[in-house]
Amino acid sequence: MQLSSDQISQIKAFIHSRGFNYIEVETEILDHVASAVEEKLEKNPEISLEKAIHSVHQSFGVMGFSIFEDELQVSLSKRIRSMFKKLLWLQISTTKVFRVLVVSSVLFFLSNILLDSLSPDLFKVFGFTLLTIISASPSIYYRRVFKVWRKKSMIMGALLWPFIFSSFYLVYLIQVMPTEMINTEHSTMQVLLGVTTLIITTTTLASIELVQKVYQWTHEKWLKYHY
């Protein structure tokens, strides 16, 4: 038998009442519960929908629906890493590499201006602060999206951590870089700046595309779930 839209809505309400608010978890649970409820109603048409839902919930054991959430955290983390690796490769293996080279060249040029015109201490502050802002730009650019979806989507919330980590990592580099190195090893500093700006540019552009893809995927799930 096919569940009606009202019956589906009742199942959704029950899932939500159990404290599962992430759209990915809700849709995963709904697929399993709706199918199981359909089977129960087919076998016993006299049973009420409410009893069928509770019976299905009890069949998951003590952990209830939380098993879906635990499994999804693992699978979504793997999915993010896989998507990010593919997007990184696309940045350097397609015509997008020209965009990477242009942006990294601009950053390298600005960093060299700071290197030549500022004292080592000021360079450490302004130079790497600039790179830190760049690395955090995806989360800044998508601030509104993250604000809306952070508590609604497990995968969107997980995307914030790579940006935060990369920003703090660059701040850490500020502290450990010897001032003498900036003073005496100009060529080494230029190589370091070149590599750093190239890596940051590549990862930042890949991260921006990652957010776009994840948002589109999540939004489609949201529309489907609330249809």
Image: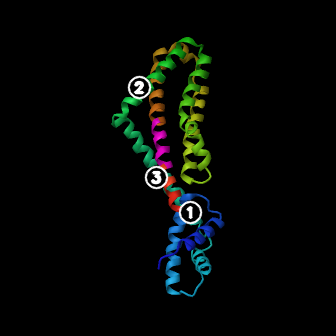
Extent of the magenta region: 205-215
Residue at 59 percent of width and 42 percent of height: 144
Assign the magenta stretch its main secondary structure: helix
Any mark on residue 216, and which?
none
Distance in Å between CA atoms under marks 2 and 3:
29 Å
The amino acid beneath tag 3 is Arg
Any mark on residue 102, and which?
2
- Residue 196 among magenta residues: no
Residue placed under numbered mark 3 in the picture: 79
109 or 6: nearer the viewer: 6
Mark 2 crowd level (few <14, some 14–19, many ≥20, 10 Å Cα): few
Residue placed under numbered mark 1 in the picture: 26
Distance in Å between CA atoms under marks 2 and 1:
43 Å
- Residue 208, image x, y percentages: 48, 39
Mark 1 crowd level (few <14, some 14–19, many ≥20, 10 Å Cα): many
- Secondary structure under the numbered disc 3 in the rendered image: helix
The residue mark sitting in front, 2 or 3, is 2
CB atoms at circles 2 and 3 under 8 Å apart? no
